[in-house]
Image (tube, rainbow, N blue to C red):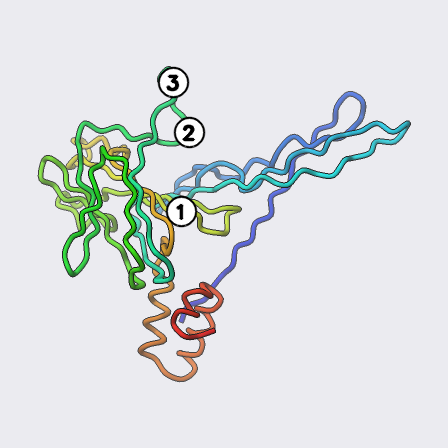
Amino acid sequence: MFLLETLLAAQGLATKQNSSGRTRAVGPAAPSGAGAANGSGATSGSGAAQVQRPSQEQSNGSKTVLSEKAAPVLMDKCTEQVGGSVYSTGTDDIIVKIIHPVPAAGGIRRERTYVESGFRNGIYLLSAKGERFIGLSSETREVSLGKLPAGELIFAIKTPERNLFQTGPASRNPDHLEHAIIKTYLTLGIELSRIEVWFEDLYGPKRASDRDFNDTAIQIRGGVANNGAVADLLKTIATEKGETRQQAIAALKELNPKAAANAGFK
């Protein structure tokens, strides 16, 4: 049975006192451990989940009056998983967009990785029914896959060297190395906004491949997640009885109310 944990993080503003003795907001507190890798290959992206704009100060005699605060600006936080997977929740149409982030002017790198490859790779969705061509890595294209059943979605690239590299574990690839990083973007660190898949298109071993994972990139939004919790709960509901089934229904309602409603549990 699944134990669900809800992570709600509140980030405050750092403050600084100026020469007149007034205290002003100077921005969000720096996140701890930003960008550090853990043993599973996952890394947490830097950047605040929410930026609260500082209030304007107005002088009123000896008193300082703070005007109404501006609305907070929402920002995305990103987590990364080498060898991760993408899953359909079965709730909404899935949209795939081939993306081409580029370096900043003058060759200065932005914090975000950009696409750089000597290959033009084919991008595919693999399934038991066969492969579905999405487009070439050099194209600017957006494709609707429609609403797909809950479960894992295996994306892949085919290179000019006739290699097929897939999302998921290293065992799926001919050189037994991971060839995709899954980047999950969460608004306010809670609500999924989109998933990106970044591929490495050079065959290993590691000394022969640069392992920079910036050769082909796609953005996926809609009924997707970076874990298979919805599919697992639906399977438990379909195969179990009694209290176990009821617990799975309750967990699904909490995890993804729309998926629960689509399955007939409101």
Residue beneath disc 1? 194
Question: Of callouts 1 and 2, which one flags the residue occurring earlier in the amino acid sequence?
Answer: 2
Q: Are marks 3 and 1 in contact (CB under 8 Å)?
A: no
Count residues near mark 1 (Cα–Cα under 10 Å), then give few for <14, some for 14-19, many for 20+.
Answer: many
Residue where numbered disc 2 is placed: 111
SS under mark 3: helix
Residue 41 at least partly seen: no
- Going from N to C along the chain, the mark reached first, 3 or 1, is 3
Q: Hey, what amino acid is under mark 2? A: Glu
At label 3, the amino acid type is Ala
Image vertical order of residue 5 relative to residue 266, above or below: above
Q: How far apart are marks 3 and 2 (CA)?
A: 14 Å
Q: In this view, does 63 lie to the left or right of 243?
A: right
**Which of the two discs, 1 and 2, sits closer to the camera?**
1
The residue labelled by disc 3 is: 105
- Cα–Cα span, label 1 and label 2: 18 Å
